[in-house]
Image (spheres, rainbow, N blue to C red):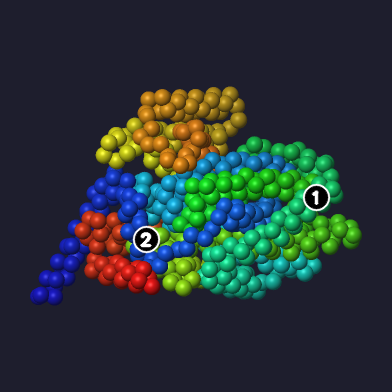
Amino acid sequence: MESHGSSFSSLGSYLRALAATPERLARRAGSAATSFEEMSRARARSGSDMQRSLRWFDLVGFGLGGMVGAGVFVTTGRASRLYAGPAVALSYAIAGLCALLSAFCYTEFAVDLPVAGGAFSYIRITFGEFAAFLTGANLILEYVLSNAAVARSFTAYLGTAFGLSTATKWRVTISALPKGFNEIDVIAVAVVLTITVVICYSTRESSVLNMVLTAIHILFIVFVIVIGFYRGDRKNFTEPADPNHPGGFFPFGASGVFNGAAMVYLSYIGYDAVSTMAEEVRNPVKDIPIGVSGSVILVTLLYCLMAASMSMLLPYDMIDAEAPFASAFRGGSDGWRWVSNVIGVGASFGIVTSMLVAMLGQARYMCVIGRSSVVPAWFARIHPRTSTPVNASVFLGICTAAIALFTDLNIVLNLVSIGTLFVFYMVANAVIYRRYVTVGTTNPWPTLSFLFCFSLTSIIFTLVWQFTPPGEHKGFMLGACTVIAVSVLQLFHCVVPQARKPEFWGVPLMPWIPSISIFLNIFLLGSLDGPSYVRFGFFSALIVLVYVLYGVHASFDAEGDGSLNQKNGEIMKESNESEDHILKV
């Protein structure tokens, strides 16, 4: 009977805790969840500290290395062939503008709160633990999937470096597995595991390796641009190879350009990874704005030039979707086929650097989420000798390798884009909320009402753009949405005063720039296909389930509510003892 009594008692306690979860979530969200001091205390869970060894040029290098490679060499071919045609350069410009606006939002947070964790940390102190976990977990999923996609693309470009056709895939096909998961890529797995070992060793040494590889890669990029414009033909901007295919610079219309922008948005994940390294930057006030915004601007320029040179080399309907630049030269005369091999080598360098930066970023996200204990605190541990999150790096490296082994590129690209856009949307909302709301002194409802109304208007605009047939009614509805959105934005700007001013660096033209970022992210989200939303909804539901069943009861915020269990108390004690030992040494 005692056994049954204790079981019912435990079950009752669990149900009471579960029933209290919505109240706890509301209380945390209303109080902005966590202060910088609490984040510093949470950092103690990692044991050793990360070393502040990075400067602005390291961040620019990480940004260039992280972005250039993944985008141009993985998504350009598909975006041009299927969506934008020769206007793919405009797709990159639109995506780059959206990324730059989001980069401003990231920079304000990173300068004010120079801690690891990027979007997870920013949203946690603004909207609370639940919103942060939903965002951070989706971001980690996005990183893992994008790295798997890039690793599989590495195999294709490595083949071109050795003069092999892209049709000659270095993969083993297993007919018993379903299509899209039946091509085993051992080379991709080897690359992922090798990079995992490198990032576990040292962040500073990883930066040096990234700088060397990025410098070599930029030389290849310039070479491709020069050769492309020199050898290309302007008629390829307007004339397809097959007359039956749509022609002109916009063969698929304006919607195709925006659909292409949504796909190539994967290219800009790298700057987000740079913001996760804020805890390792020597002078955050100076170095982070230059590193984040500078890298986005430089990369956008390179992307547009490369996309334009590719469009000049071949008609859009002849571009190889998997290795577009290398194949563009292979189809020509024998005197130019050597360029394909050179591009294969350059692309391989670019893909390795982009994976290096992205895998650095994903490990730091997992480390910070581990500090909050919404996932096991084991992920938060910093190795005392290397000063890197070894546990998180190894775990995510294995997950990335497993996905890269089986999963086809088509399966993951759109899911990666939807995760990226969702996270950037959340950060733009967070920076507005943080500027206009101070807990305890400012009424949050005017700001929350503005964010809701502006997002709703942006969603309606996007739905009208996507699903309403062309005509006067469509133009009227789009114009009405635009007038409403601008009016709401201007009313908020005039009526609601800012509650705080950034001490060092802030987003200019507040709230216009973050609001434009919100609109662009929603608009690009509307360009993705239905199955992507189904997968996104499934993974988000799974994340919520993990949080409700585990994270909310074991988290760092739960400790503040007096409900942290004994095991987490022991982890904190162990972390403090580790810190004391390090200080004595």
Q: What residue sits right under mark 2 in the picture? A: 43
Quadrant assignment, res 12: bottom left
> Closer to the observer: label 1 or label 2?
2
Tell me if residue 493 comes above or below residue 59 in the rendering: above
**Does 15 sit left or right of 143 as displayed?**
left
Q: What residue sits right under mark 1 in the picture? A: 226
Pinpoint residue 497: horizontal percent, then vertical percent: 37, 29
Pinpoint residue 275: horizontal percent, then vertical percent: 50, 52
Q: Nearer the viewer, residue 92 or 244?
A: 92
Q: Mark 2: few, some, or many residues within 10 Å (few <14, many ≥20)?
A: many
**1 or 2: tag closer to the N-terminus:** 2
Marks 1/2: CA–CA distance: 48 Å
Task: State whether residue 355 appears in this view.
Answer: no
Looking at the figure, which quarter contains the C terminus? bottom left
- Identity, as a three-letter code, of the amino acid under mark 1: Val
- Identity, as a three-letter code, of the amino acid under mark 2: Arg
Q: Residue at x 62, y 65 (%)?
A: 209
Q: Residue at x 71, y 55 (%)?
A: 218
Q: Nearer the viewer, residue 427 or 275?
A: 275
Task: Label 1, secondary structure: give it.
Answer: helix
Q: Residue at x 64, y 41 (%)?
A: 93
Q: Residue furthest left?
A: 1
